[in-house]
């Protein structure tokens, strides 16, 4: 999950209620359920666990099929699921098309996806750029999710370790029963995650841009540091921009979960334009087979 890119300069609550929250509705069981789903796929000999990242921070007009409204996100999720996605990650928008963490916009988007795709795990972003870099505004917005109905809360939310205020946000999400995906962009982020002692649903090893030829070595440095520090949790490896397809292949070969979608890349592995998220998922599934 990355902050908005200037186009001029560069490119699981209701799988069943019990599965998502545990038999007693315990938030810790919610994380355990999400953690188990992520951990049991992507191992060698099993189908790679694949998440579709539907829109990200991209701006209206960046791609003809970029989903923004709840109905568009629901249709994109339905198509991605049909193409082979195991979960979806989305950035809900307000009425003007801007990213939003408000309960109204989060709830509407998640509810629409759940209605279109019953049982499909749904995750959202908590990127600090969404609130203009304001830590307190972000935390207040996420705490506002407490007013949402169970079917409107996401199964998990990504929290970037490079952003200030991540620990307080992490605890807020856990109190809501929302699983945390730790966004680790660097070796320094791996160190920060280890220092907290916190456990998460997944560790997202995210290589954002940079030269494609160094993407695997950069990813390996982060993965090796996480292993060295004994950081728990299943890994999901992906890239944005040029490294996207290279790192999807690396994830598949390494038995790690991964993701693909219009948030990460707008073209096929050979550079051709794609029609949308479903096509990207189909291409990914073919490569991961």
Image: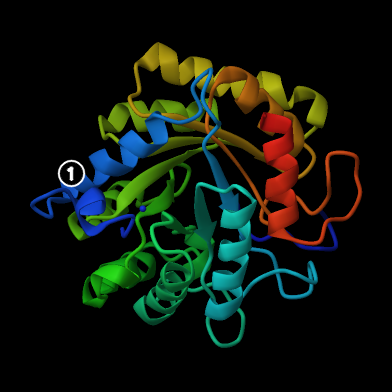
Q: Foreground residue, 97 or 253?
A: 253
Which residue of the protein is positioned furthest toward the top in this rendering? 228
Q: Visible in this render: residue 141?
A: yes
**Residue depicted at x 49% and y 22%:** 43
The residue identified by callout 1 is: 29
Q: Residue at x 57, y 48 (%)?
A: 85
Tell me if residue 5 comes above or below residue 145 in the rendering.
above
Which colour scheme appears in the figure? rainbow
- Measured as percent of width and height from the top left, residue 3 is found at 61, 56
Relative to 73, say whether 216 is above or below. above
Question: Circle 1: is it few (<14), some (14-19), or many (20+) Cα within 10 Å?
Answer: some
Q: Quadrant of residue 145?
A: bottom left
Q: Position of residue 146 (x, y in %)?
A: 22, 71
Residue 209 visible to the viewer:
no
The number of callouts visible is: 1
Q: Is residue 244 left or right of residue 31?
A: right
Q: Position of residue 58 (x, y in %)?
A: 69, 64
Q: Quadrant of residue 56?
A: bottom right
Tell which of 228 and 267 is nearer to you: 267
Q: What residue is shown at x 72% (from left), y 75% (from top)?
A: 60
**Residue lying farthest bottom?**
95
Split into 4 quadrants, where in the image is the C terminus?
A: top right
Q: Position of residue 113 (x, y in %)?
A: 47, 69
| 257 to 254, vertically: above or below | below
Q: Secondary structure at mark 1?
A: helix
Name the residue furthest front.
82
Left or right of 54, for residue 39: left
Image point (62%, 37%), residue name: 238
């Amino acid at each position: 999950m990355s902050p908005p890119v200037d186009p001029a300069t560069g490119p699981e609550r209701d799988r069943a209620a019990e599965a998502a929250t545990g038999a007693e509705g315990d938030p810790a069981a919610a994380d355990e359920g999400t953690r188990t789903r992520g951990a049991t796929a992507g191992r060698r000999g099993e189908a790679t666990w694949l998440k579709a990242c539907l829109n990200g921070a991209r701006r209206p007009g960046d791609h003809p099929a970029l989903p923004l409204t709840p109905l568009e996100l629901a249709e994109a999720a339905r198509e991605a699921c049909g193409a082979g996605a195991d979960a979806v990650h989305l950035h809900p928008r307000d009425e003007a098309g801007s990213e939003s963490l408000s309960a109204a916009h989060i709830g509407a988007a998640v509810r629409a996806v759940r209605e279109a795709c019953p049982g499909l795990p749904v995750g959202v972003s908590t990127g600090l750029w969404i609130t203009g870099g304001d830590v307190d505004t972000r935390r207040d917005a996420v705490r506002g999710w407490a007013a949402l109905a169970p079917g409107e809360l996401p199964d998990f939310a990504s929290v970037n370790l490079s952003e200030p205020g991540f620990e307080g946000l992490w605890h807020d999400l856990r109190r809501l029963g929302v699983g945390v995906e730790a966004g680790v962009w660097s070796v320094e982020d791996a160190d920060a995650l280890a220092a907290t002692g916190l456990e998460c649903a997944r560790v997202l090893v995210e290589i954002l841009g940079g030269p494609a030829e160094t993407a695997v070595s950069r990813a390996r440095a982060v993965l090796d540091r996480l292993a060295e520090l004994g950081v728990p949790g299943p890994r999901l490896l992906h890239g944005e921009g040029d490294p996207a397809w290279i790192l999807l292949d690396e994830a598949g070969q390494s038995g790690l979960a991964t993701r693909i979608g219009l948030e990460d890349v707008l073209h096929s592995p050979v550079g051709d334009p794609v029609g949308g998220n479903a096509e990207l998922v189909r291409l990914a599934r073919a490569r991961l087979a």
